[in-house]
Amino acid sequence: MNIFGSSEESQGDTTPVGASTTTDQDDHPDPTTSTSPPSTSQTVTDDPTATVESTPAVRTGGPVDSPPSNESPYDDPDDGLSLTGVTVQVAGERRRDSMLRLADQLTIEVKGDRFEVRGRGHVEWECDTVGLRTVVVDGRHARVYAETREVDSCRTPDNPGGRGPWAISFSIDGQFEGGRPDALTASIQGSFIDDSGVFATESL
């Protein structure tokens, strides 16, 4: 799923990724804001090896720009660095993964002044989604944190089939302004994510 160059409207905020999958811990907590529109959900399978037909991704957050100044625990950006047009999209297909056999993971790709984070994470219900939590440039370190979000539309007792866990794929893209920072850290956090959070950092 490659969405370089797309963007539109929202808000985000919270924790660290690399061109290869990594799990490391970040020492900064984080503040921010959010919105949680429902995402589409479709294919039901509990077999991680099953082929799932691709459906269009749904934007669930953004575009968001990093602020020109930050509150604690983040430092203000150095040298006018910023992130612009940061957007998260969630793939339409989902896989039921009750045994949690599919790994939660993140990768980062940087081309010129643009970046894309691709990931997979687990949510509790079929209609749950992923949104932006934190988008900041902390000194010379860019941070783009995503989180899983509950969506009430299918969380009802008369929909036992909607309960998972479900593995969902998502991507986050955006642009560097004022040059590249020294590093980009991304994360996906949530109660059904490995260790409640997966992080990756790419040195730039």
Image (cartoon, rainbow, N blue to C red):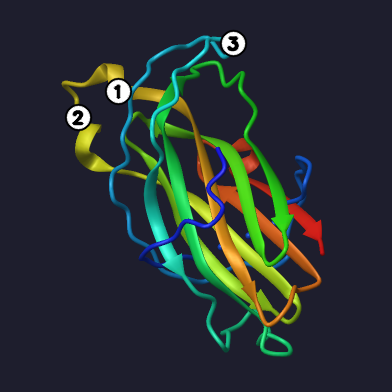
x and y, in percent, of residue 35 in the image:
33, 60
In the image shown, does 5 or 166 lie closer to the viewer?
5
Q: CA distance from mark 2 to mark 3?
A: 29 Å
What percent of the width, then of the height, locates residue 59?
38, 50
Q: Amino acid at mark 1?
A: Gly
Say which residue label 1 marks. 162
Compared with 82, 168 (above or below) is above
Question: In the figure, is residue 164 to the left or right of 137?
Answer: left
Front one among 108 and 166: 108
| Residue identifier under label 2 | 156
Mark 2 / mark 3, whichever is N-terminal:
3
Of labels 2 and 3, the one closer to you: 3
**Residue 78 x %, y %:** 73, 87
Q: Secondary structure at mark 3?
A: loop
Q: Earlier in the sequence, mark 1 or mark 2?
A: 2
Identify the amino acid type marked 2. Answer: Thr
**Who comes first in sequence, dot 1 or dot 3?**
3
Q: CB of mark 1 within 8 Å of CB of mark 2?
A: yes
Q: Which secondary structure, mark 2?
A: loop
Left or right placement of residue 152 versus residue 179 in this view: left
Secondary structure beneath dot 1 equals helix
Q: Is residue 100 left or right of residue 56?
A: right
